[in-house]
Amino acid sequence: MQFVLAIRGQFPPGDDMSARFEELMEQVRLAKRLGFTGIAKSCHYSSSPWQEIQQIPFLARAAAEAPGLTFITSIVLLPLHKPLEIAEQTAALDLFTGGRFILGVGIGYRDVEFKAFGTTRQERVPRMVENIQAIRRLWTEDEVTMKGSHFELDGAVCSLKPRRPPPIWIGANADPAIRRAAHIADSWMINPHNRIDTILRQIEVYKRGLDEAGKPWPETLPLAREMFVARTRAEAIRLARPYLEAKYKAYHAWGQDKAMPEGDNDLGQEFEDLARDRFLFGSADEVAEQIVGMMKATGANQLSLPIQWPGMPQELVLEQMHVMAEEVVPLVEQGL
C-alpha cells in the first residue's frame, strides 16, 4: 500500500507566492520524514481565480528536497503539447528522481486552455493517443520518424533517455476515457471528483477494457480522495468546508462537470449534497474505515491525498499530514 501526498499548489490571488513556495517545500520534506511514498503535482493553465505553480518545474525542484520518493505528474494535459517536448522534459524528471518518475496524463476539458495552445476539444483524443505513441518511441528508439495530426518527427532524437521508460497513467472521469486508459496506458488514475458508487461501477468498465486489450490488472492502481480528519465528522466538515467548497465551486465554473459521467456530473450542488459519498470526513478511525472499504472494493493500492485546498493555512496542512501518517495510515494498514 502506497500513500502519496497530492499537491495542487494553488493559492488565492494576492498571496505571497514566494512564501507559499517555501511552505510547499516544507510539505515535501515532511512527507519524506513521515513515510509518504511519493509526491504528485497537478496542473492547469490560466487557473483563475487561483495562482498556481506549474508541475514540471515544481517536481524537478521537489525531487532535490525528498530524494527516494516517487514523483508523479497528476496530470499533464497531453493534448496541449507536442510529444518531443514532453518526452525530453519527463526524461529529465526521470533522471532527477533516480528513475522514480511516473507520467500521469489527461485529456483536458477547458476551452480556455485548448484555445491558448492552438487546439480544440474535438482534437484532444487523437492528439493524446498520438502523443503517447510518440513519447514511448522517443524514450526507447534511437531515432523516430512519425507524422501525427499536429507534429512531424523526421529522424527525431530524444536528447536524454530516461533510466527506464516511465509508466504512463491516464487520469479519467468518464467511461470512454476509462476504457481508453485500459487500452493505451499502464494504469488508470482514479479521480477524487466522482462519488464512490460511480467509481465502483467504473471499476467494471476498467476491467472490461483490460480484458478487451488482453492486459493484466496493473501493478499499481492509484486512487485519489479528498479527506479531512478531526475529532468528529462534524468538526472535520466545519474545518475543511471553507477551502474545499471554494475549490469545487471553481471546478464547477471551469466545467469539470462536463468531463464526468451522466448522473454524477453536478459539482455545483449544495456542499452537503456534494460531500455525500464523495469526500471522506471524520475521526481517524472513521476515515481509516472508509479508506479500507474503498481500497478493498476497488482493488486500488495507492492512495493519493490532496489535503490542501486554496486558502488553507500551512499549520492546518501540516497537522493533517501528521494525522494521516501517524494515525490514519497505521489503521489502514492494519485493516488491509
Image (cartoon, rainbow, N blue to C red):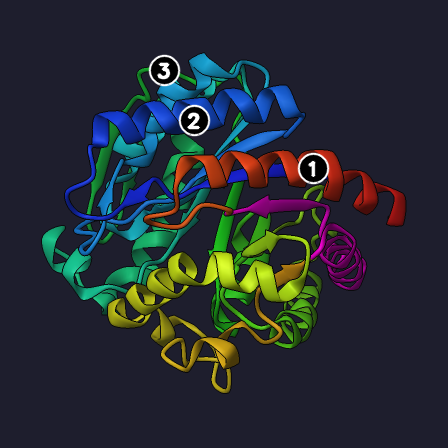
Q: Where does residue 193 sit, x and y in percent of width and height?
A: 49, 65
Instruction: State the count of labels.
Output: 3
Please indicate, yes or no, whether residue 91 appears anywhere in the rendered image: no
Q: Is residue 53 above or below residue 155?
A: below
Which residue type does callout 3 highlight?
Answer: Leu
Read off the magenta span.
Answer: 283-306
- Mark 3 and mark 2 lie on one chain; the one further toward the N terminus is 2
Label 3: how many Cα within 10 Å (few below 14, some 14–19, many 20+): some
Query: Disc 2 designates what residue?
Result: 139
- Mark 3 and mark 1 lie on one chain; the one further toward the N terminus is 1
Image point (46%, 35%), residue name: 315
Q: Is residue 252 above or below residue 298?
A: below
Q: CA distance from mark 1 to mark 2?
A: 26 Å
Q: CA distance from mark 3 to mark 2?
A: 8 Å
Q: Which SS class for mark 2? A: helix
Location of residue 282 (image quadrant):
bottom right
Q: Where does residue 46 sit, x and y in percent of width and height?
A: 16, 51
Query: Disc 1 designates what residue?
Result: 2
Please indicate, yes or no, whether residue 203 appears anywhere in the rendered image: yes
Q: Which SS class for mark 1? A: strand
Which residue type does callout 2 highlight?
Answer: Trp
Which residue type does callout 1 highlight?
Answer: Gln
- Mark 1 and mark 2 lie on one chain; the one further toward the N terminus is 1
Query: Disc 3 designates what residue?
Result: 160
Q: Is residue 155 magenta?
A: no
